[in-house]
Image (cartoon, coloured by chain):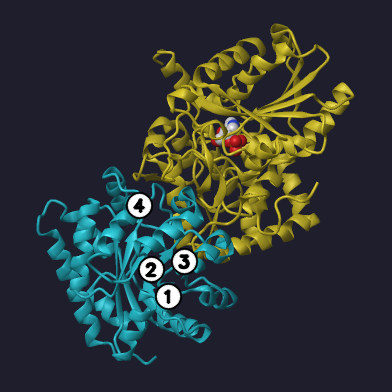
Amino acid sequence: MQQLPNERGRFGDFGGRYVPETLMPAILELEQAYVRARQDRAFQAEFAGYLKRFVGRPTSLYFAERLTKRLGGARIYLKREDLCHTGAHKINNSIGQALLAIRMKKKRVIAEPGAGQLGVATATAAAMFGLSCEIYMGTEDMQRQALNVFRMRLLGATVTGVEAGSRTLKDAINEAMRDWTTNVRTTNYILGSVLGPHPYPMMIRDFQSVIGREARKQVLALEGKLPDYLVACVGGGSNSIGLFHAFLKDRRVKMVGVEAAGLGIESGKHAARFAGGKPGVLHGTMTYLLQDDDGQINLTHSVSAGLDYAAVGPEHSYYHDAGRIHYTSATDDEAMAAFDLLAREEGIVPALESAHAVAEVVKLAPKLKKRQVVIVNLSGRGDKDVQQVARIKGVSL
Amino acid sequence: MSNRIDQTFARLNAKGQKALVTYIMAGDPSLQETETLVLEVEKAGADVIELGVPFSDPIADGPVIQAAAERALRGGASLRKILRTVASLRTRTQVPLVLMAYYNTVHAMGEAAFCRQAAEAGVDGLIVPDMPPEEAGPLEGPAAATGLQLIYLLAPTSTPARRTMVARRCRGFVYYVSLTGITGAKLTNLGDVRRNVDKIRRATDVPVAVGFGIATPQDAAQVAGIADGVIVGSAIVRQIGEHQQDPRMPERIGQFARSLKSAMAGSAASPA
Ligand SMILES: Cc1ncc(COP(=O)(O)O)c(C=O)c1O
């Protein structure tokens, strides 16, 4: 298999660097710094050290015995990224990029919040390393996630509301890119997922691929064989590519990425880029996008903020077209049901994002043989979502 | 093949004058109004007119231009309709028209189809603020074949190597971004602008126009002393936004353009 991406940041037709000239030098500088760090044993050792001692890696690969029985098919393992410090896989990437910022002598980092998880993870890494940190967040999202806003402020970050556009994630990304354009000499932009211009999709994949390297070893030790299926939710695509990457050469391992079908694909209110989108350019990269015939970006919907975005990472677009990874989707309702199921059967409250992956396992596992093995990436814990779930269920707290 | 942009800069240069380049968002508040505005600013002395193509996620623009894009999209503007507007304008004016479009709007139409239709409509040049030359492969061929001039941006952060590479790829003019930031920010360091424009001139014979942050006749006069062209965007777009309801809005914009142009005339003798 050839090395992806190529030196121009391309995964086949996808990826690249579609950014204003003002940012090009910074992106080239970031790429150089990262390529050096990637080959530098000291950097890798430092990164691994923080993942172990601060994040708490390796995370366990946990056999979900009751869920397996209940579904009556394949043996189901949960890769427990919910046990990471701050409660999701996002911290792997925040630590990696913060370390790189320090190497590049940048004293300030900015980020958008993702589902709030990335904002918290980045504020956490910034606090730990003594960097100044500003998080851009749509005012609509700030309301929906008041708790996370408070948490970021506790960690010393400045949280800045964005009033433009739909006041959600993509507007926050627009604003963060503008800040970066203005303060590019002093600031690193910590992107939360395998999105944006090269080198971000490659770099964030590398930082997250620890998930799959661990899982591969763990499943070999536990089962004496490779898994039959890997399942993960796909927002930008970092937890999924993080799990999948170490298995891509294992031709027999099937991979399923689960997008958010929201209120259903037919409703138009969803974030399933492969079901409803086509290739285009948003936020610096060529990839599958939800857009109209004029190339305007569509508004998306998902119960889970971390999956509620119009673009998917370019590497996923490549593996989609190549047929190596299969993409499907789960609706809000299916995710909510899976959320309840995992809480009751396994004593684990998953993030709503991760519940989409569990929802796919609910459909898949019963169709498989009892000796087959499925690994599902439990990308985060659900504490951040509890308030919202209560609201949806009509429970006042 | 000489195109309207080249002819305009050559004509002004022969008279020792600088080009006033005005930006308006096509379709703000309506495409009908855009036609009126183009004719009005041309009459007021604009030498080149940039038409913004509205995009839902304009990362290189500040709040003023984003708000204009939102108004234009609400009014139903699209790249296809804007090309029809250009074709209609071409029956009445030969002023050079440059589209400023984010890559996805062009890509959605198809790079080759866009170039063909834009050239047919009478568009002279294209600026894609989120497309550095490295990503221009699919556009450069069709643009060259149809005579559409691709204009790239250079910034204060551009390295010497990029400055040379980008400047040499520019057709029509080089768009020098006066500041490290987005449209609508404040112009601060004119000394830097002059040094960078001089460096760009050493890399190419194509004229250099300066934009971002030029808001007043005084700004325009100062930049006219440095560069071949002065690009004014947010300051015009802001006034269009503020006077939407005023039936005399196009005349007001014309007056503003006239004040920019006459300030530039006062300071035109440049040391180029
Ligand atoms: C817990 C969790 N899982 C998944 C995601 C989706 O992102 P990605 O597809 O990059 O893993 C998020 C995003 O915020 C998240 O917080």
Q: Residues within 10 Å of mark 1 (few under 14, many from 20)?
A: many
Q: Secondary structure at mark 4?
A: loop
Identified by mark 3, the residue type is Thr
Numbered circle sitting on residue A189: none
Q: Which residue is mark 1?
A: B172
Label 1 and label 2 in one chain? yes
Distance Cα–Cα, label 2 vs label 3: 10 Å
* Dot 3 and dot 1 residues touching (CB under 8 Å): no
Q: Residue at x 73, y 7 (%)?
A: A72
Distance Cα–Cα, label 2 vs label 4: 18 Å
Identified by mark 4, the residue type is Pro
Q: Secondary structure at mark 3?
A: helix
Image coordinates of residue B88 in percent, x first then y, are 26, 59
Distance Cα–Cα, label 4 vs label 3: 23 Å
Question: In the figure, the yellow chain has which letter?
Answer: A
Q: Which residue is mark 2?
A: B124
- Between A258 and A319, the one lying in front of the other is A319
Identified by mark 1, the residue type is Gly
